[in-house]
Amino acid sequence: MVLIPMLRQVIDIPIIAAGGIASGKAIYAAMTLGADGVQIGSLFAVSKESSAHDNFKQSVFEAGDGQTKVVLKSLVSVRLIKNEFYRKVEKAESEGASREQLAVLLGKGRAKMGMFEGDTIDGELEIGQVSAMIDELKPVQRIIDELVDDFNKTAHKKPYLI
């Protein structure tokens, strides 16, 4: 039996799935739904080769389930690890801060401060929700090998045809 994903019935351009991709199973699921490929951010953001600061990487490894949240929706929707900066943003949003007030709070270089300079208190710590699945520093080659192996094991159990 051939499965024809609904998305493919209405779109005839390459489809790249993004968000929540941190395992071969997730890649398999995206491709089963019709994706031609996937974008993987969080796993590579904290890889051994990543230029992110070690403090940021450690924050990601320690972030458990529910430790990230989407904020700044009126500016640039972003998922952050909960830290002091996040709490300031959450408070400002709950008090009805305007876009302009949020922009002032965000300032310039806040992401650089957190992710590349290692300020895990006042820096912006952007990472995907899959951070709860990431708990160790791995080289990129190992990440890719594990993704491919997991994908192949999943596909072997549940082959799909597109």
Image (cartoon, rainbow, N blue to C red):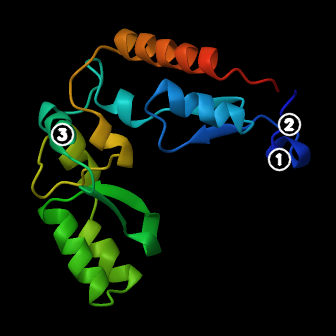
Task: Name above or below for residue 48 compared with residue 82.
Answer: above
Q: Assess whether mark 1 and mark 2 are in contact (beta carbons under 8 angstroms).
A: yes
Q: CA distance from mark 2 to mark 1?
A: 6 Å
Badge count: 3
Residue at image coords 29%, 23%: 47
Question: Percent from the top left, x then y, of residue 13?
Answer: 83, 38
Q: Is residue 109 visible?
A: no
Q: To which quarter of the image does residue 9 belong?
A: top right
Q: Could you tell whether 144 is left or right of 119 in the image?
A: right
Q: To which quarter of the image does residue 110 belong?
A: bottom left
Question: Percent from the top left, x then y, of residue 29?
Answer: 61, 35
Rendered-image quadrant of the N terminus: top right
Q: Which mark is residue 4?
A: 2
Please give the residue where the numbered disc 1 appears in the rendered image.
Answer: 6
Q: Could you tell whether 18 is left or right of 12 in the image?
A: left
Q: Earlier in the sequence, mark 1 or mark 3?
A: 1
Residue type, mark 2 in image: Ile
Q: Which mark is residue 76?
A: none
Residue at image coords 37%, 36%: 42
